[in-house]
Amino acid sequence: AGLSDTIHELAASGVTKSRLGIGQVFVLGFIASSYLSFATTLSIVAGAGIQTPGLQKLVMGLVFPIGLISLVIGGGEMWTGTAMNAPVAGMTGRAPWKAVLYTLAGSYAGNFAGGIFCAWLLIKGSNIIIGPGYANPAWAELLHNITMMKSSLTFSQAFWRALACVWLVDLAVYLSFR
């Protein structure tokens, strides 16, 4: 398939998304965020016991995409992918811009709510990562180290890492249409 075929398919996907109600997009956004939250948890669990930093990052990097694959196959709405599909439908004139904006807003709100809920569920509600009885101390230590590293980034570092992350997610979504 050529580039124009891929853009046509992206636009068709954006049209489908923009026809969903904002509540439907919110729920799909919540589900997508959940897929990635569970993949992040699995990545931490898989990598926590590995002492070699390069091997640890490799294992975590190989495990995490399970969430993105689940999201693409399962049909969740991650804002990063929606921010590519829906505007393509608007730019090609196949969806009204108001519907595109509702789709983006619903996806973002659902991702935010799903992420907050899963953070609570996995950390406080079920004690999977930290807490008595379930958690391996190595999991909490790795989570703490990741949190400290990310919170110590400068604005510029965080911005460019986020841009690279969105780029890679959009590349994965784009390749799913090829």
Image: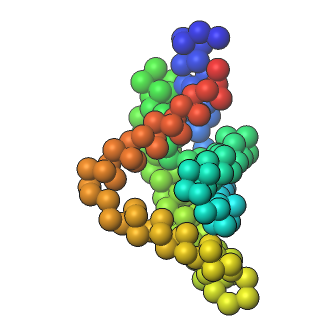
Q: Foreground residue, 58 or 21?
A: 58
Q: Is any part of residue 177 visible from this angle?
A: yes
Task: Note whether 31 is above or below 103 in the view shown.
Answer: below
Task: Note whether 111 is above or below 2 in the view shown.
Answer: below
Task: Note whether 142 is above or below 170 in the view shown.
Answer: below
Question: Residue shown at 55%/56% (left/top)?
Answer: 53
Q: Foreground residue, 109 or 55?
A: 55
Question: Residue shown at 59%/39% (left/top)?
Answer: 17
Quadrant hosting residue 48: bottom right
Quadrant hosting residue 45: bottom right
Q: Is any part of residue 81 visible from this angle?
A: no
Point out residue 13 in the picture as x, y percentages from the top left corner. 61, 30
Task: Note whether 1 is above or below 114 in the view shown.
Answer: above
Q: Foreground residue, 101 or 73?
A: 73
Question: Residue shown at 40%/47% (left/top)?
Answer: 162
Point out residue 120 in the picture as x, y percentages from the top left corner. 58, 77
Question: Residue shown at 49%/62% (left/top)?
Answer: 112
Point out residue 5 in the picture as x, y percentages from the top left corner. 60, 13
Q: Foreground residue, 14 or 84?
A: 84
Give the quadrant of the N terminus. top right
